[in-house]
Amino acid sequence: MKTDFYNPACESLTSAHEFGVYDTKSKTARIDSDNRELWVACVSNKNQTPVVFTAIDNCIFSGSDEKGRRCDGMITYPDNIIFIELKEQRTSPWVSHTVEQLENTILLFVTNHNLAAIRNKRAFAANKSFPNFQHPQPADYQRFFKKYRVKLHIDTKIII
């Protein structure tokens, strides 16, 4: 069965200059423009481009219904897609688990949609509780890009 990653029931539209992405208590990602304490990732949208945030985990996919863990959400706008996984943990190896969730989501997306048709593709692993950590080696970033044609970032700041 085909999964629609563009389900309006899971989407929020914003053109805010700056907004945050966070996980609710029910583990469904949301965006917010006012309450910075909630934000795990901060999105800078200086041109106030209209963007769509889509909650993936626990909205597009609920529970353990398909092929393991997925990332929390994605931001889309013309010719751009940004996959986002949010973490608030101090324990290692959070980076490898986060990258695995991004990879799983990208593979599911490719199964259901034409990712190659989107010009700019990025994936963000954001952890507000552990901003200082051992970054992956440049070869890891290159491997990720070569395999998925998606640029991997490990950062809490996303620029539109």
Image: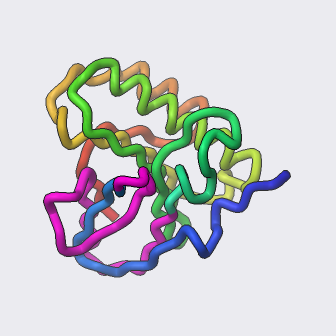
- The chosen color scheme is rainbow
Q: Position of residue 95 (x, y in %)?
A: 35, 26
Furthest residue toward right: 1
Q: Is residue 112 left or right of residue 1?
A: left
Q: Residue 140 lies in what quarter of the image?
A: top left
Camera-nearest residue between 137 and 102: 102
Camera-nearest residue between 118 and 52: 52
Residue at position x 26%, y 42% from top? 155
Quadrant location, the C terminus? bottom left
Check residue 118 for magenta coloring. no
Residue at position x 24%, y 77% from top? 17
Residue at position x 61%, y 51% from top? 62
Q: Is residue 151 left or right of residue 2?
A: left
Q: Position of residue 33 (x, y in %)?
A: 24, 74
Q: Which residues are magenta?
A: 25-54
Judge whether 108 appears above or below 90 on screen.
below
Camera-nearest residue between 112 and 48: 112
Q: Position of residue 76 (x, y in %)?
A: 50, 66
Camera-nearest residue between 11 and 77: 11
Picture mark count: 0
Judge whether 141 appears above or below 13 on screen.
above
Q: Is residue 141 left or right of residue 107?
A: left
Q: Position of residue 21 (x, y in %)?
A: 32, 59
Residue at position x 27%, y 63% from top? 20
